[in-house]
Amino acid sequence: MKIINIVPGFGGTFYCGNCLRDSAFTNSLKKTGHDAITLPLYLPLNSMNSSSENDLPVFYGAVNVYLEQKFRFFRHMPKWLHKFFNSPAILRYASKKSESTRASGLEEMTISMLKGAEGYQEEELELLINFLKYHEKPDVVHLSNALLMGLAGRIREELNIPVICSLQDEDVWIDAMNDNYRTKLWDIMCEKSKDIDAFVAVSQYFGDVMQKRMCIPNEKLHIVPIGVDPKVYRFSEPVQNPPVIGYLSRMNKENGFEVLIDAFIELKKKDKFKNVLLKATGGKTSDDNKFLNKQLKKLKRNGIEKDIEFIDNFSIEKLNDFFEKLTVLSVPVLKGEAFGMYQLESLACGIPIVQPALGAFPEIAKETNGGVIYEPNTPDILAEKLTEVLSDREKIKELGSNGRKAVENKYNTDELTRQMLIIYEKVISSINVLAN
C-alpha cells in the first residue's frame, strides 16, 4: 500500500509532539512493508533541511502562502519567483520567525486554507495535486490534522482515493483566534468534514470534543492513540537523590512552564526539598523570549537560578540522556491537550508523569497507571502533588515500571499502526465497492 502522510512542517525550532507522532508512524508503516512518505507543508520538518528524509519538496511554502494571502499580485507570480520563496534558505529563515507558529493574526489565512480550491492558495493546491497524481500515485492520503481538510476535496476528486484525517489539538489553534472568527471557522470545518472518509482521534476525550464541534457521524470516527517505539527509549529507574523534575515541551505560557516554575519555587522553600532540581527542554520561538526572561528573574530573586538546567538539544537521541536524569516529568499545559507525546516518551524511559486533570491527561494516567493528576492547575496545588509523589520512593518506582509496560503493550507504535491499517483497508474497500 502506498500511503502519503501530509503534515505541517515546523522547522525544528521547538519540541513538536504531533510532528514526532507523524514521523514515528511513517517509520512504522515502512517497517511493515508499506510504501510510506511524510510530505511537509509550509515549513521543512527540520530547520536544517528543506525537505523530508526522502528529499521531497515542501508544498504550500510558508512565504508563498503568506504572500498569496496578503497580496493579489503574488497569487499568479512567475515560477522563478515562486521557486525562490520556496528555497531552503528562505524557508529556514521563515522557520525561525514566531509568526509562522502563532494562531493570532492568521484567521483569514486559516479560512483560505480550509476553502481549498476556493481559497487564495489555489495554485499551491494544484501543484500538490499534480505531484500526488503523476509522481507518487498513493492508495491513501492521511492528513495529520483537520486544519488541512481544504486539500481533501480535490485529492478525492482527482485521484479517487480515500482521505483520512487525524484529530489532535486543532481546537487550541482555533480558540486562540479572534472571537469573530471562531464560529465561522468551526462552521467551515463542519462542512469540510464531509470530504473526509475517516477521522482518527488520538484519545477518547478529544474524539468526543471534535465529534461535536465538527459534526462527525459515528461511523466516521475512530480512536487510535499515539504510540512510540519502546526500543528507541532506554528504561531506567527514576533518580532519587537528589530528586529531579523534568519539563519537555515548548517553553511558553500556554504549555504551563510558568506554573511549573512557580511550583518549583514553592517546593524549594520546604526543608525536605531544598536540594530538588529542575531540568527543562523543548525549545522556543522568539515570541517566548520575554516570557522566559521573566521566569529567570523570579528564579534569581529566590536565589535558585543555578538549580535549573536548560537543555537545548531535544532530539530523540538526547532525550534518553535527559530522562535518565529525572525523577518525574510535569508539563502543566494550561488547558490540557488531546494527548501529549512527551508523556509516552517519559513513561517509555520509566519516568512517572505528574499532570493536571485537564484534556486527555486523566485518561492517559488511568490507562497507563504511570502517573498522577491534580486539580486545579495552579502552582500551589502542583507543589503539593509533587511533594506527595517525591516523598514516596517506592511509589515512584512502581509508577515508572507501570508506565514502561503500558508503552510496550498498549502504546507500541507497531500495534497502533496495525489498527490504522485496518481503517485504511476498510475505507479503500468502501471506495472500490462504490466504484464498481
Image (cartoon, rainbow, N blue to C red):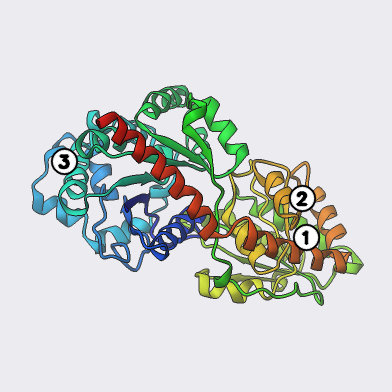
Quarter occupied by the C terminus: top left
Residue at 62% from the left image edge and 75% from the top image edge: 234
Q: Position of residue 335 (x, y in %)?
A: 63, 41
Kind of residue at badge 3 = Phe
Kind of residue at badge 2 = Pro
Mark 1 and mark 2 in contact? Answer it, CB < 8 Å. Answer: yes
Q: Above or below — where is 67 with respect to 418?
A: above
Kind of residue at badge 1 = Ile
Q: Which quadrant of the view contains residue 345? A: bottom right
Q: CA distance from mark 1 to mark 2?
A: 9 Å
Q: How many marks?
A: 3
**Residue named by callout 1:** 265
Q: Which mark is residue 379?
A: 2
Q: Which mark is residue 91?
A: none
**Crowding at label 1, few (<14), some or many (≥20) Cα neighbours within 10 Å?**
some
In terms of secondary structure, where does tag 2 sit? helix
Query: Observer-nearest residue: 288 or 190?
Result: 190
Q: Earlier in the sequence, mark 1 or mark 3?
A: 3
